[in-house]
Amino acid sequence: MQTKSDILAAIGDTPLIRLARASDETGCTILGKAEFLNPGLSVKDRAALSIVRDAEAKGLIRPGGTIVEGTAGNTGIGLALVAAVRGYRTVIVIPETQSAEKKATLRLAGARLVEVPAVPFANPNNYVHAARRLAEKLAASEPAGAFFADQFDNVANRQAHVDTTGPEIFDQTGGAVDGFVCAAGTGGTLAGVAEALRARKPGVTIALSDPDGSALHAHYTIGTLKAEGSSITEGIGQGRITRNLEGFTPDVSFRIPDTEAVAIVFQLMREEGLSLGGSSGINVAGAIRLARHLGPGHTIVTILCDGAARYASKLFNAAFLRERGLPIPEWLGAETGELP
Ligand code: PMP
């Protein structure tokens, strides 16, 4: 018998896929960790499971209790599926600007949604602060209490990647990994994988690939948290040093414009059958930059965070791309419906 005890046992152990064009053009082996194959279809299933297990171990959550989180979507989807299996309810506070697909998926996963205006972290109405306040209110009013998952500052998030993603990458490459690069939202993936790889392979190069509009690249290169521009990517970019990023420093940092990331997303879809979201484009662009930085012959790993289906109305919508001056692939540009 080769069965899983439940769907949560299917989280992790994702394949590492060779990215042909990126590898061929750089002379490196560039590998993408296929996190879009997790049950909730993103890398955030790992953090969700780790956060709930940690809360259970610490007695912070009771059977039938409510898990509250502020999330751009993927963490909420992960939490909703973990909560369903473990017998909790989920309430998700989400900025209203997030994609309709992610909101619909959250509802399909059984989460209750509270939409709030998208305002910066410094504003008390920011979705993270709103979620914390809602958790405090529900903790008092709900019979089984409530728990604030707090993905940005709860280091059980980073620990998921110290315990699983990082060791998987080391083992799957037979220890040959020379470089790892990804973007940071909470920073859990980047700092966690870095910790696991640095412990197993001193000398491994860890890089940040930061989208426009994020303050991290400036922080790690010139020492000030300064953000410039904006990005259509979701779930990545950060304006502060979260607790998951505390104590972490990348060896190298790249700032990636959307034009570069979006072109890579379309190339991977058209030529390599990989249907990915925007943050994966930022990550693969970062892997190509890291390959050029290290030179030919190196093995570089990055994260394929989630799939294209979550962004159909944005990243895969010709009108949306045209408005923002982004490249439109020919198969999205055909609007007349006429056959050639
Ligand atoms: N890509 C996507 C699509 C995400 O939702 C997230 C999570 N916010 C990330 C990347 C970044 O992961 P992390 O929070 O571990 O930095």
Image (cartoon, helix red, strand yellow):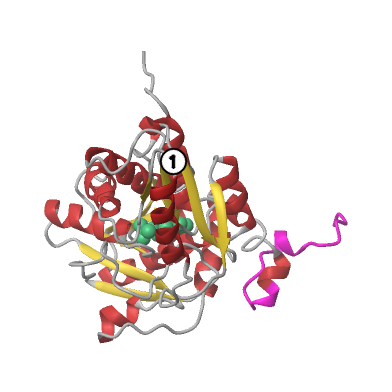
The location of residue 132, given as percent across then percent down, is 39, 60
The residue that appears at 32% across and 69% down in the rendered structure is 208
Query: Per the image, is 337 magenta?
Result: yes
Question: Relative to residue 173, is residue 86 depicted above or below?
Answer: above
Q: Secondary structure at mark 1?
A: loop
The location of residue 227, given as percent across then percent down, is 41, 82
The N terminus - image quarter: top left
Ligand 1 resides in the quarter of the picture at bottom left
Identify the amino acid type marked 1: Asn
| Quadrant of res 97 | bottom right
Q: Residues within 10 Å of mark 1 (few under 14, many from 20)?
A: many
Question: Relative to residue 306, is residue 98 depicted above or below?
Answer: below
Q: Main secondary structure of the magenta part?
A: loop
* Tag 1 residue: 38
Is residue 304 visible in the rendered structure shown here?
no
Query: Per the image, is 30 magenta?
Result: no
Question: Relative to residue 334, is residue 35 depicted above or below?
Answer: above
Viewed as shown, does residue 62 lie left or right of 199? Answer: right
Viewed as shown, does residue 146 lie left or right of 258? Answer: left
The C terminus - image quarter: bottom right
Is residue 220 visible in the rendered structure shown here?
yes
The residue that appears at 21% across and 67% down in the rendered structure is 246
Question: Relative to residue 273, is residue 291 depicted above or below?
Answer: below
Viewed as shown, does residue 142 lie left or right of 155? Answer: right
The residue that appears at 25% across and 60% down in the rendered structure is 191
Front residue of 326 and 313? 313
Front residue of 185 and 27? 185
The location of residue 160, given as percent across then percent down, is 28, 47
The residue that appears at 55% across and 47% down in the rendered structure is 112
**Count of labels in the image:** 1
Magenta-highlighted residues: 322-340
